[in-house]
């Protein structure tokens, strides 16, 4: 199987399955996807004196829907899959923006969710 075929298979996976796959890859190859996740830049007094910036890894994100885009129904269905909420609750989230889709997500999960919703045309933020 070539890389493009693998990517096509991954695109068809649910968010839950994709998160599980990331965990399996991390364990199998003894790597961490967090190493490539976004980091927050924090300035310390010592770093400021030396003209440097210290970095600290962000431990949790809120995944926020800013704009559902043109595929509002698909976005609502995806929110239902991610949150386990009813369709009515999911529709209310989409109607009252910005809306937190997932609170306290680890960096890997947050990025996966963001990419999944953006692939459907939604505008997302990680806070």
Image (cartoon, rainbow, N blue to C red):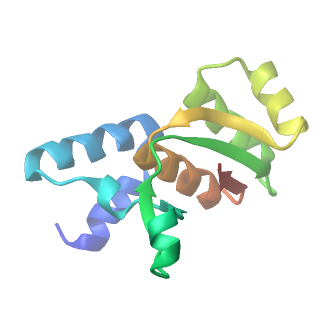
Image quadrant containing the N terminus: bottom left
Choose top left, top right, bottom left or bottom right for residue 99: top right
Image-based side of 111 in relation to 26, left or right: right
The residue lying furthest to the right in this view is: 96
The extreme bottom residue here reads 51
Q: Give the camera-side residue of 118 and 72.
A: 118
Front position in the image: 103 or 75: 103
Q: Quadrant of residue 5?
A: bottom left
Q: Image quadrant of residue 120?
A: bottom right
Residue 70 spot, x, y in % from top left: 81, 57
Residue 121 position, x and y percent, is 70, 60
* Vertical order, 81 against 69 (above or below): above
Residue positioned 14% across, 43% down in the render: 27
Q: Residue at x 83, y 44 (%)?
A: 98
Residue for point 30% across, 55% down:
33
Which residue is pictured at 20% across the width and 41% down the height?
24
55 or 80: which is nearer to us? 55
Q: How many marks?
A: 0
Q: What x and y, as percent, mark residue 6?
A: 27, 62
| Vertical placement of residue 15 versus 66, above or below | above
Judged left or right of residue 57, residue 99 is right
Q: Is residue 58 left or right of residue 36?
A: right
State the image coordinates of residue 71 (x, y, percent, origin top left): 76, 52
């Amino acid at each position: 199987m070539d890389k493009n075929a693998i990517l096509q298979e991954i695109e068809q996976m649910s968010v839950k399955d994709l998160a599980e796959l990331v965990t399996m890859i991390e364990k199998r190859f003894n790597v961490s996807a967090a190493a490539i996740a976004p980091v927050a830049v924090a300035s310390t007094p010592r770093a400021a004196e030396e003209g440097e910036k210290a970095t600290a890894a962000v431990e949790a994100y809120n995944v926020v829907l800013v704009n559902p885009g043109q595929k509002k129904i698909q976005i609502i269905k995806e929110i239902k899959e991610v949150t386990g909420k009813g369709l009515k609750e999911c529709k209310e989230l989409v109607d009252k923006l910005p809306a937190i889709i997932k609170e306290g997500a680890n960096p890997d999960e947050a990025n996966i969710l963001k990419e999944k919703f953006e692939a459907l045309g939604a505008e997302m933020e990680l806070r």
